[in-house]
């Protein structure tokens, strides 16, 4: 059963979407999420700018990572518009221009979002907005 809450407003971020995407990736990393990716979807879709994808080995661990990411995003000025917590091993949080996807390993292998969006540039999130050393850093 899915748990969904929120509204569908857009353009409500206090920080640029690219900074919030990096903030989410860092929060995932701090909670030891695996295989963290930030995909730049600008110009590919019109419903969001970035996907932040991470995984963990259990649903309980995913939920702990999710709580930390949600807190970091809200403290960073993001406003969660919607949330889906499915027993399928896929947690989703919609921050408008940034969509957070957290997967159990088996679910990530099944849905393969990074392959589905293989043409989306990957953001070097460890460089962050201060360094902007990555050649594909947006903005």
Image (spheres, rainbow, N blue to C red):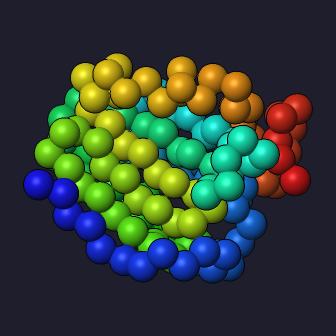
Q: Nearer the viewer, residue 110 or 133?
A: 110
Q: Nearer the viewer, residue 111 or 121?
A: 111
Quarter of the image where the N terminus is located: bottom left
The residue under the point 60% across, 74% down is: 10
- Outermost residue to the left: 1
Q: Position of residue 88 (x, y in %)?
A: 19, 39
Q: Position of residue 2 (x, y in %)?
A: 18, 57
The number of callouts visible is: 0
Q: Can residue 22 be seen at all in this image of the molecule?
A: no
The quadrant where residue 46 appears: bottom right
The residue under the point 53% across, 26% down is: 116
Q: Position of residue 93 (x, y in %)?
A: 41, 59
The quadrant where residue 135 appears: top right
The residue under the point 74% across, 66% down is: 16
Q: Nearer the viewer, residue 72 or 55?
A: 55
Task: Give the side of residue 1 with respect to residue 79, left or right.
Answer: left
- Outermost residue to the front: 46
Task: Give the side of residue 89 with respect to residue 108, left or right.
Answer: left
Q: Position of residue 117 (x, y in %)?
A: 60, 29
In this rendering, the answer to whether 59 lies above or below 117 is: below
Q: Can residue 47 be seen at all in this image of the molecule?
A: yes
The residue under the point 70% across, 32% down is: 120
The quadrant where residue 4 appears: bottom left
């Amino acid at each position: 059963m899915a748990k969904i809450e929120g509204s569908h407003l857009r353009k409500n971020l206090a920080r640029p979407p690219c900074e919030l995407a990096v903030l989410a990736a860092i929060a995932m990393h701090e909670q030891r999420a695996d295989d963290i990716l930030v995909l730049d979807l600008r110009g590919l879709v019109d419903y969001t700018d970035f996907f932040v994808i991470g995984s963990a080995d259990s649903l309980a661990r995913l939920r702990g990572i999710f709580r930390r990411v949600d807190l970091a995003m809200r403290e960073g000025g993001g406003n969660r518009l919607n949330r889906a917590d499915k027993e399928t091993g896929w947690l989703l949080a919609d921050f408008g221009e940034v969509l957070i996807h957290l997967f159990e390993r088996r679910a990530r292998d099944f849905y393969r979002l990074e392959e589905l969006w293989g043409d989306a540039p990957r953001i070097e999130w460890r460089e962050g907005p201060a360094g902007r050393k990555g050649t594909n850093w947006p903005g």
